[in-house]
Amino acid sequence: MSRQTVLTLDDVSKHYAAYPSNLIRFANWFGAGLQPAEVFKAVSNVSFSLRNGEAIALIGQNGAGKSTLLKMITGTVRPSSGRIAVQGRIGAILELGLGFNPEFTGRQNVYQAGGLMGFPREELTRLMPSIEDFAELGDFFDQPLRVYSSGMQARLAFSLATAVRPDVLIIDEVLSVGDSYFQHKSFDRMRRFRDEGAAIVLVTHGLGDVRALCDRVLLLDKGRVVKDGAPDEVVDYYNAMIAEKDNARLQVEQSRGENGWQYTRSGTYEVTMTNLQLLDAQTKQPVATARIGQSLVLRLTAQANTGIPNLVLGCMLRDRTGHVIWGTNTWHTRQAVQNVGPGESVHFNLHFPCHLGPGSYSLTPALTSSDTHLDNNYEWQDNAVVFEVVNPDRPVFIGSSWLDTKFEVKRGDA
Amino acid sequence: MLLAIWSYRHFISAAIMGELRARYARSRLGLLWSVLHPLAQALIFALVLSKVLGAKLSGVEHDAAYPIYLLSGIAAWNLFSEILGRCLNVFVEYSSALKKIAFPRICLPMIVWGGALINHVLLLVAIAVIFLFLGFTPSITWLALPLGVLFISLFAFGLGVILGLFNVFSRDIGQALTVVLQLWFWMTPVVYPIAIVPDNLLPILELNPMVALVGIYHDALLYKTWPDIGSLIWPALIAVTLFGAAFVLFRRVSPELVDAL
């Protein structure tokens, strides 16, 4: 597969003009050249390029400009300045089920909505069997759309929208449709498109999707690209950013360890972590490589710099791909510490047996004031402790969890 | 733009059928309703006003002259108001598709136009049947009708698209047009014969292009005469100008359209 640039955005901006009166807007159509009263900058100076086989995710809070950017790439919204160059056919799924008519059957809707997407009728006829097959609607395919469940509509829409592999595939938060079986299936199809050479631009709030599909992530905030890099780096930065909406007080520092794990430390630091260590429960010796079944303890001390009403320790265990294996906090276990005075220390020990599969894992501790990290993020350290799990003494198994399983095997008549 | 329309012809034709089917979905009479509405309107006027206004129709010796006059006028007006009214709202109706799918936007008013034309043809067929039923034989002058259809379409399409574009930015246009259309209907000799209009008002009335365009229908269907080419110059000029202006404005406004939806 030859790698060539298929999508280029060069200093793209989109400004929405607000006119005090529509008369001024109308006058401008006839060449009056009047200035608008106010300009809202939805997207400012975004540049990136994408080669085939690459997948990029756009993440950011609501109103960050993600959807506007996608619409500009799709071609429905024209950029105010800058240049967008596309090689090949764009396939965009900005909303599932657009152009569908509830009175038509699934088959008729494929012609109707497919026509809207620019497919000639003969091609739709040719594609029909594969669309029908992928949507798995059975007899419903020839019944009116109004009797469909919303998941069935989504299946038909996705099946149509991805009937042909485009050169650039644009997807706006549509992966969350349908049941998990279909989600999995549609995800597989996108991954196959990418492997076959399609470039993918994806907007999502499912950060798991990002890690699984994309090689690169752009974080947008207020229409600007604030971070551009590898998925774990940008996603952890984003998590730190939403942890404290009052961004002025928030400090974020990031680095990538020699072992490849992305380390992100953020917070407002009313309380800070000290003495963070992963120890063997018996010997109290630091552990970097753990055996399956070994008793471990994560130890840390929270040092209050100012008085706080509520202190909660959260902890998260991730595998190598960034998937969360386990996580909880002391709010859920009803062990929140109240009224911590200035200068006071709180010691935490998290005991857990190492019932994990062989591989590399990380622990992410966070000090917050409640069950979510959105109220107060005092200190958060993504992947602060990294350890390996080895399997010296158990039968070989795969997966990230050690389950105490036993086969019963008998020969002869049952 | 023409090329875009051609390459999307399948979509346009599918969408026209879709619109018609969707509008009358799950009603037993279906498409018949699009014909029954104007016919019922003509029937009401005929019942209420035939004594008052029917006598004023000169030049035709037929018992059903007034109903025939009404039917021809209402057919013409119906074509005009349907294209105009639908063009006005089509961009707003399709706003989500406009925002999220890249396709030639000019397809939308084309769909409206196509749908209205099909309805119109059905109505004309129904009218022909009614004429026979009334014992009034259609004449060769029916062949002049395509001329009326053409100019009324151009006029309504041009005006509708222009107002429809403005309507995206200021929805007052749509509301105002409902009122204006009512007034306009009564400013056009559909219900009453033009003969009852006082002579001093006649020049003002004739500024209205619809007067001559509805006249084509009256001439062809009732009076069985060919249209007077001289009287058509003014409406034809306006229709073609508006049609052209609609395309020019459409090109200018198109980039801003999605921003306001």
Image (cartoon, helix red, strand yellow):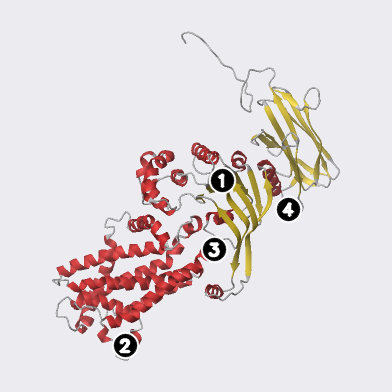
Task: Give whichever of A357, A275 is nearer the camera.
Answer: A357
Give the amino acid at mark 4.
Answer: Asn
Give the distance between the C-alpha atoms of the residues marked 3 and 2, in whole angstroms.
45 Å
Q: What element carries label 4?
A: loop
Q: Are marks 2 and 1 in contact (CB under 8 Å)?
A: no
Which residue is denoted by mark 4 in the rendering?
A247
Kindly identify which numbered label has been placed on residue B259: 3
Q: Extreme right residue here? A: A343
Q: Extreme front residue here? A: A2
**Chain letter of disc 4 in the image:** A
Give the amino acid at mark 3.
Answer: Asp
Nearer the camera: disc 4 or disc 1? 1
Q: Do the residues labelled 3 and 2 touch (CB within 8 Å)?
A: no
Which residue is denoted by mark 1 in the rendering?
A200
Q: How crowded is mark 1: few (under 14 residues within 10 Å), some or many (20 or more)?
A: many
- Establish if A61 lies above or below B64: above
Which residue is denoted by mark 2 in the rendering?
B202
Residue at 71% over, 44% down: A370
Give the amino acid at mark 2.
Answer: Leu
Residue B81 coordinates in the image, percent (x, y): 35, 71
Q: Do the residues labelled 4 and 1 touch (CB within 8 Å)?
A: no
Residue at 34% over, 84% down: B205
Compare marks 4 and 1 and give the one earlier in the sequence.
Answer: 1
Image position of A45 (left or right of B212): right
